[in-house]
Amino acid sequence: MRLFRTILLFLLAALTVTLAVFMAIDGNLARITGWYRYEIGMPLFSKENAARLDDVSWMRLSDLHDTIECSRDAQGIWWITSPFRDRLNPEVVAGILNFTARAKLVESLPNTRGIRRNMREYGVESNPIRITLKVDNHDGSYSTVARYTLGNPSPWLEDAGNGIDVIPTTYLRTDFYGRDKRIHVVSGNIAHFFKNGLEALRDPRPLQLDPEAVLDMNITGSGAHSTPLQLRRLSSESPWNIAEPIPTAADDDAVRRLATQLCRLSALRVSEPVDVTLPAEPEWRIRLQSSDGAAPIELCLYPPFRDEESGSEHCYATVSNRPVVFTLPAERPIGHRGSYADLINAVCELPVLPQKALAQVRTGHSTTYTRELQLSLPELRSLQLLDLDPKDMARFSLIDPQQRHSLLFRLIPGNSDNQVEDLWMCSESPGRHRPYTAEVSLVQRFLRSLGDIPVEAVVADARPGEDIAPLLSPYGLDHPRYILMLQPNPCAVRVKIFGHDLPLVKDRQPRTVLIARATAPGSSRAAWYAHELHTGSIKQLKPLFTRQLSLRVAKWKQRSLTDFPISAVRRLTLDYAQAPLILDYDYIGESWSGTLGGQDITPRINPNRAEYYIRRLQKLKVSQWLEADDPEALATLAKPVFRVRLDLEITDYSDAEAAIIRSQEAAPTDNGDTEALLHGSDAATAEQLRDIALAERPTRRETRTIEIAPAVYDSDKPHFYGRLVETGELFLLTFDDAQGLAGDILDL
C-alpha cells in the first residue's frame, strides 16, 4: 500500500513538472487541449494571447535555409540579433503582428492520405516559414504567445463581411495548442514578405528618421565639392539656413525635399560588409542630426557603378549605426519614368515585360535615385533677392544716385473693421510734384517680387571676414544705377520703461540693395546685378523683376483719376461742342437742378442717371499715365472735344488730431492721460473722438476739370488722351471709359 502511494505521488509530481514546463515554454496550458476547441470563424489565437501581441519583444523566423532571431530595443526598434546585428524592416514586423492578431480559421483540411500525398501544394513542409513570437517576462525568461508554420497562399477568398470585399487566405499549421498535424486555412496573407528569403527582411531604408525632425545636415563631397556644406534650422517650423561655407539663406523647399528624399532612400539589396568590396572613398558624406537628441547619423554614398545583371546604375551606401552595405538605385532606368505613356511603350515594345521592370514602371515616381539628390551649394541656396514679407514693409525708397533723384513710398495703414484700405503715398526728391497716391497693386507686386521672383544666379560670394568691395566693381555695383532702401515696420508690441516707449523685440534695421547693369567678366551680354549691404553675395537678376524698376512718376501713380466723396459734389458741368450742361447737386435733399444753354432743364434731369454718372467718375481709372511734356498728347489736347468739370466742397480733417489734443488740454480726462485717449479702443472713447473730430470742421473748395480728345489709334485698341487741367497731368483713357463720360443724363 505504501509503495502504491509512493508511485502515485511520483506520477503527480511528474505531471506537475510537465505542466510547469509547458507554462514556461508557452505561457498557456491550453496547448495540451488541442485545436478542437476552436470553430470556423474563430481567431487563430485566443483573445488573451492576441492581447499580448503588442508586448511581443522577441521573434524567430526560419525557412528551409536560414533562421534569424529578432528583438525589440527600448526605443521600440526591431533588430536582427542573429546571425549578425541589423535593423529589421518595420513593415515586416507590423505585417506579422497584424496577421497573427487578425487571422481567423476559415477551414481545416482532414488529415487523410490524399491530403498527405499532396503536401507540396500546401507548402507547410515543402516551403515552410516558421514564426515564433514571445514576450519578455522581465525576469530573464520569455513566454511564447504564438507559434505557427506558414505555407502557400490558398485559392480560397474569404468574405470581408461587407458582401463586396474579399480577403486572401493562407495554408497554415500550428502546434501551439497541441500536436494537431492538420493543415488549416486562415484569413490573411503575408507570404510576399518572404518571397526573396529571410535576408530580404532587413530594413531597406538606410535612415529611419522623420524628415521633419532633422535640424542639421552636414554635406561633404569629393573633388570640387570637398568644402563642407552645413545647413541648420532652429526647429521643424523654422526655415533652413546655410551656415558654411557662406552664411546665407537656403532654399527651404529644396532642403526639405532633400531631407525627405534621404529618409526615403530604399535599398535594392542589404549585404554584409564581407560580401562587398567598397571603393576607397565615398563620393558624398552626409551627417544628419535629429531633434530627438540621439547621436548624429552619417550616410556615405559611394561612386555609382553599372550593374552587369540589370544594366542599371547602382551605388553602395553605408550608415554609421548599421554594420551593413546598401545597394541603392543611382539613376532612373531609361524608359521607366513612372508615367502611363512609358508603361504603354514598355508593354508594346517587349513581348513579355519582366516583373521587376513592371514594378519599376508602376512605382518609379516614388523611387529616390542618388544621382537626383541635390547636394551642392548652388542647388540648395536661396535664389531670392530678399527674404521679406511684403506686409511687413512700412516704407521704401528707390534712388538714382547718378541723377540725384529718388522716390519715397510710405504706407498709410487702413482699418479692416471700418473697411478702410491701405494706401501707399509716393513723393519725389527733389520735389517736382506734390505727394500723390501710388497704385497699390503695383507697389504690392513690386514688394512681392523682391522675395518671390528667384534671381538668375549667384555670381560671386565673399567668405566670412573677406572684403566684398573688390567684387562689386566688375558688376558695376561700385557705381549703382539704383539704390533700393527698405524700412520694415517697427515692433508693434511696445512697453513704457522709465517714461520711454520701447519695443519688446528689437526693431529691425533698414535694408539697402545696390542694383546695377553691367557686362560681367567672361560674358558677352549685359545683365542686371544686385548686392544687399552687409551680405556676402552678388546676384544676377531676372528681367521680370528689373522691368519694374522705374523712377518715372507715371509708373507708380495711382490710376484712379478722381478721388472724392459723393457728399462733396456741389456742381457738375459737362461741356460738349454745344452749350454746356450745368447740374447743381443737393446731397442732403438728394435733388438735382440745372441749366442747358441758360435754359432751366431741371424737370428733364434723371436723378438715377446723374447719380450713376457721379459713381462712374469716382471709379474712373486711367489706362496709363503719360509724361507731362508728351508732345503728341499736348498737341491733341490743344482742342479738346469734351470737358468735365467737378466743383467740390471737401471737409478738411488735416487738423483733427490737433483739435483733439487741444480739447483734452482744456478739459483733461480723469487720469489726465491725453495719449491714452488718443489711442483708446473702448467705445466711449471712440465716440468722443468722433464727436471732437466732426464738430465744425472747416471746408475747402476744389475744382477738378478733365479734358478729353481722341488720339491717333489703330482700330484694335482705340484710346483717348486726357488731361487734369488743374495739375497738368496727362493720361490715356480706353474708348469705353471715354465714351462713358459722354453719357446721357437728361430725359428726352
Image (cartoon, grey):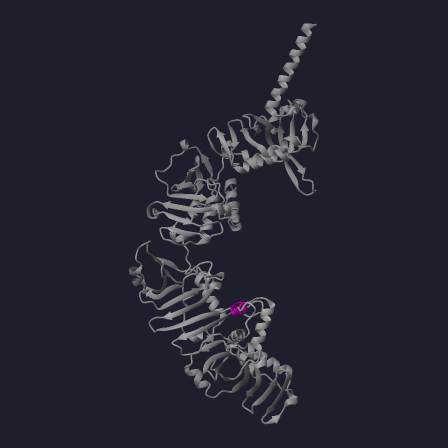
Note whether residue 392 is visible.
Answer: yes
Which residue extends farthest bottom?
598
Rendered view: 334 above or below 65: below
Question: Magenta residues: mostly which secondary structure?
Answer: helix
Residue 545: percent from the left, percent from the top?
A: 42, 65
Note whether residue 189 is visible.
Answer: no
Q: Please check the rendered image and state whether residue 303 is part of the magenta-colored stretch, yes or no.
A: no
Residue numbers of the magenta segment:
673-679
Location of the C terminus (image quadrant): bottom right
Q: Please check the rendered image and state whether residue 675 is part of the magenta-colored stretch, yes or no.
A: yes
Tell me if 239 is positioned left or right of 139 in this view. left
Tell me if 474 is positioned left or right of 347 in this view. left
Question: At x 54% / y 30%, what residue is drawn?
Answer: 58
| Residue closer to the observer: 105 or 288 | 288
Tell me if 226 is positioned left or right of 491 in this view. left
Residue 287: percent from the left, percent from the top?
A: 41, 43
Question: At x 41% / y 41%, what residue is drawn?
Answer: 298
How many numbered tags mark residues here?
0
| Residue closer to the observer: 301 or 448 | 448
Rendered view: 102 above or below 627: above
Residue 231: percent from the left, percent from the top?
A: 41, 49
Quadrant position of residue 685: bottom right
Residue 621: percent from the left, percent from the top?
A: 52, 76
Location of the N terminus (image quadrant): top right
Rendered view: 630 above or below 668: below
| Residue closer to the observer: 302 or 587 | 587
| Residue closer to the observer: 574 or 173 | 574
